[in-house]
Image (cartoon, helix red, strand yellow):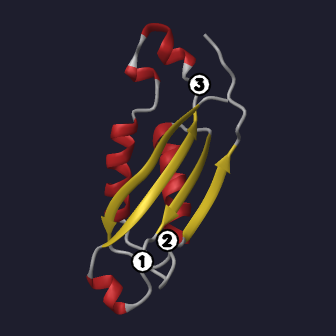
Amino acid sequence: MDKVFIKGLSIQTTIGFFQWEKEIKQTLVIDLAMGWNTANAALNDELAKTLDYADISVAIERFANDNPVDLIETLAERLASYLMTQYQIPWLKLFIGKPGAVHNAQTVGVEIERGTQAVEISS
């Protein structure tokens, strides 16, 4: 299966359980791998036939800021569902890290995988 990916996307959003977290923006770091048939785009060098990672990167930050939640688990689940629906992505693996959330840890977070990895190549 072909994959389009975004690694190390750093966004600022409101997330957290504690009241003080609801009053500030915190950094989340996102890695996203998306199953996609890249052959169709490559055939005639067409952006419209692939996943536009620049557009998806903007959509991720917008979604996180428009849909504040307490848990990164909730954000991961809702973001995965949104991306799969909005961009017709059949499979994705999403990692969301929250650097600095735990003393002495570089980051903490969640990684989820949704959908079916089998992507048929058709012309």
Q: CA distance from mark 1 to mark 3?
A: 36 Å
**Left or right: 67 with respect to 4?**
left
Q: Position of residue 4 (x, y in %)?
A: 52, 35
- Residue under the point 50% across and 82% down: 104
Q: Circle 2 is placed at which residue position?
A: 107
- Residue under the point 69% across and 23% down: 120
Of labels 2 and 3, earlier in sequence is 3
Q: Of tags 1 and 3, which is closer to the observer?
A: 1
Q: Circle 3 is placed at which residue position?
A: 37
Q: Nearer the viewer, residue 97 or 49?
A: 97
Disc marking residue 47: none
Tag 2–tag 3 contact (CB < 8 Å): no
Q: Amino acid at mark 3?
A: Asn
Asked which secondary structure carries label 2, the reply is: loop
Q: Amino acid at mark 2?
A: Thr
Q: CA distance from mark 2 to mark 1?
A: 6 Å
Residue 45: which quarter of the image?
Answer: top left
Asked which secondary structure carries label 3, the reply is: loop
- Residue under the point 63% across and 58% down: 112
Q: Circle 1 is placed at which residue position?
A: 100
Q: Position of residue 47 (x, y in %)?
A: 38, 22
Farthest residue in the bottom direction?
19
Tag 2–tag 1 contact (CB < 8 Å): yes
Q: Amino acid at mark 1?
A: Gly
Of labels 2 and 1, earlier in sequence is 1
Give the tally of numbered discs: 3
Q: Position of residue 78 (x, y in %)?
A: 51, 61
Residue 36: which quarter of the image?
Answer: top right
Asked which secondary structure carries label 1, the reply is: loop
